[in-house]
Amino acid sequence: MQFKFIAVVLGTITAVSLAVPMQVHAAELKVARTFHFGFWQPVARINPHQPLQVEVINQTHIPLQYGLTTDSAKTLLPGNVAEMSYISLPTDVLIYPSQQEASLRYHVTKVGNTTIVKVRQLASDTPGDGSLAINRTGAIYIY
């Protein structure tokens, strides 16, 4: 009786341990619609055939400089929002501290064809984000 009980318990444990990895593996096969094979993945995508806007939100406590690489930089004070319109692709958006050294982190989302960049300051000396690149196909990368 004791042998039969141990055999049932071991059989159940074995069956469960074989079933669980199969379920986890099946869940890992789902790929995002925006995924393209390669090392560097975009943080978002916009439609390159529609007008593009970029909105920068300064969530730091320091003034930032921002602008396209084709324009002169403008100042964005803490807590303020700046909008850039009529942007042609490909383009690079630079966002960096005005006077002092600081590490920045970008959080990029999109609403329609507007790219929203929330900028916050990191509490470390580690180099942070420095530019946003939007290529001809609408893929958005952070560098």
Image (tube, grey):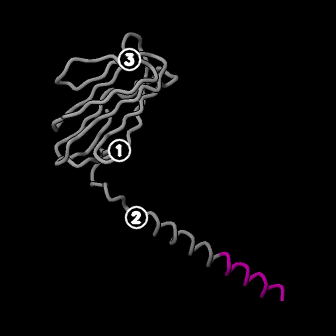
The amino acid type, in three-letter code, at marker 1 is: Lys
Along the line of sight, which residue is nearer the eye, 74 or 13? 74
Q: Give the range drawn in magenta.
A: 1-13
Kindly identify which residue carries mark 3. Answer: 97
User: On the rendered structure, is 127 left or right of 23?
Assistant: left
Q: How crowded is mark 1: few (under 14 residues within 10 Å), some or many (20 or more)?
A: some
Q: How many labels does the image show?
A: 3
User: Is residue 41 in view from this perspective?
Assistant: no
Residues under numbered marks 1 and 2 in contact, where contact means CB atoms less than 8 Å apart: no
As displayed, is residue 32 above or below residue 4? above
Percent across and percent down for residue 13 are 67, 75
Identity of the residue drawn at 29% across and 33% down: 132
Q: Does the magenta stretch include residue 6?
A: yes
Q: Does label 2 or label 3 sit earlier along the sequence?
A: 2
Q: Distance between the residues labelled 1 and 2?
A: 22 Å
Percent across and percent down for residue 20 are 57, 70
**Marking on residue 17:** none
Identity of the residue drawn at 38% across and 17% down: 97
Kindly identify which residue carries mark 2. Answer: 30
The amino acid type, in three-letter code, at marker 3 is: Pro
Kindly identify which residue carries mark 1. Answer: 110
